[in-house]
Amino acid sequence: MESKGRVGPGYLVGSLVLLLISSILALVLAEYIFRVFKELQWCRAVKWHQHELYTMLPDSPLEYALHPGVSRENLIPDTGLTWFYRINSDGFRGDDFEFEANRKRVLFVGDSYIFGWGVEQDDVLIRSVEQGARQTAL
């Protein structure tokens, strides 16, 4: 008596391959939909989020850039204290850079802590490191 069901090893392997391919295609499609959704969210955020300190950069991995030449005094809420920042002509906080040959430089990359949000211009971390380096060099 012959069995009419497809239970052989070839059928099982074929089913597993089909399941694997279907799963991969489903994951690729889900990833594509997620990326389209996130891109639409980003474009909406860029459209509505404008600030006097920075500009959103939708086609850049940097996401935003500081406006060169901006300076502002800020009030810290509920304290009455103020702090000041100035953005130089290159888009960084502080004075314009003085480039000299054979002078070592250090690049700081970071977030609001490195920027010194809420800290006076002369009290930011970068200024403290610069002053320490000058004292060490003497």
Image (tube, helix red, strand yellow):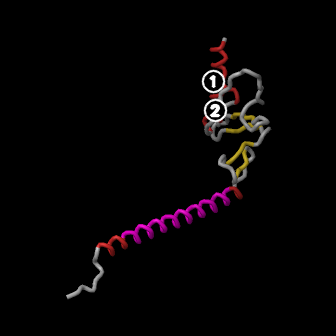
- Left of 10 or right of it: where is 71? right
Q: Nearer the viewer, residue 86 or 62?
A: 62
Secondary element under disc 2, as helix, strand or loop, is loop
Task: Tell me the distance, in whole angstroms, between the alpha carbons under discs 2 and 1.
Answer: 10 Å
Please tell me whether residue 105 belongs to the stretch shown in magenta: no
Q: Cβ–Cβ below 8 Å for labels 2 and 1?
A: yes
User: To which quarter of the image does residue 73 belong?
Assistant: top right
Q: Which residue is mark 2?
A: 108
What type of secondary structure mainly makes up the magenta span?
Answer: helix
Q: Amino acid under label 1?
A: Val
Q: Which contiguous range is marked in magenta?
A: 16-45
Q: Nearer the viewer, residue 37 or 94?
A: 37
Vertical comparison of 90 with 1: above or below: above
- Left of 8 or right of it: where is 59? right
- Circle 2 packing at 10 Å, graded few (<14), some (14-19), many (20+), is few
* Horizontal and vertical percent position of residue 135: 65, 14
Vertical comparison of 74 with 96: above or below: below
